[in-house]
Amino acid sequence: MSTARPAAPFFDFPGYPHPDYEESIGGSHHLSLSVTDENFEGIKNRLRARDIPFMEVEGSHAPNLFLADPNGLRLELYGEPLGYALDTYLL
C-alpha cells in the first residue's frame, strides 16, 4: 500500500499568457480535469489544430498540460483516470 498523500498543488508559469491573478470572493486558481491516456494525445492535437496555446509539463507523474479557457479560467488536463492520484485509487 502506498503511503503517498495527494497535496493541493500551486503552480506559477512565468511567461505563460495567463491573466494576472486577482484575489476575489468565490474565485479559484485553476480547475483540474482528469483525462485518460487514450484521449490525452488527441486533445493536444485538437488544441494545436485550433491554435489554442497550452503548456505541457514534463517530468510529472502523469502527463498534464495547462491552458486558459476563453474567459481566462486556468485549466489543467491531467492524464490519470478519474479518482486516482499517483496510481492510487482514492474514491
Image (cartoon, helix red, strand yellow):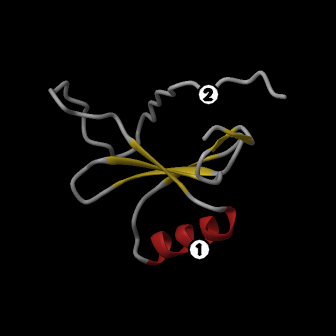
Question: Element under label 2?
Answer: loop
Q: Is residue 35 left or right of residue 67?
A: right
Mark 2, other Cα within 10 Å: few <14 / some 14–19 / many ≥20 = few
Question: Element under label 1?
Answer: helix
Q: In the rendering, at what x and y percent does residue 38 appear?
A: 68, 69
Residue at the spot 46% in from the left edge and 27% down from the top edge: 10
Q: In the rendering, at what x and y percent does residue 17 appear?
A: 34, 46
Q: In the rendering, at what x and y percent does residue 51 appear?
A: 40, 71
Residue type for callout 1: Gly
Q: Which mark is residue 42?
A: 1
Q: Is residue 11 left or right of residue 81?
A: left
How far apart are labels 1 and 2 at the CA level?
Answer: 27 Å
Q: Is residue 37 left or right of residue 8?
A: right
Tag 2 residue:
6
The N terminus: image quadrant = top right
72 above or below 4? below
Residue type for callout 2: Pro
Q: In the rendering, at what x and y percent does residue 22 appear?
A: 19, 28
The C terminus: image quadrant = top right
Residue at the spot 37% in from the left edge and 40% down from the top edge: 30
Mark 1, other Cα within 10 Å: few <14 / some 14–19 / many ≥20 = few
Numbered disc total: 2
Residue at the spot 47% in from the left edge and 31% down from the top edge: 11
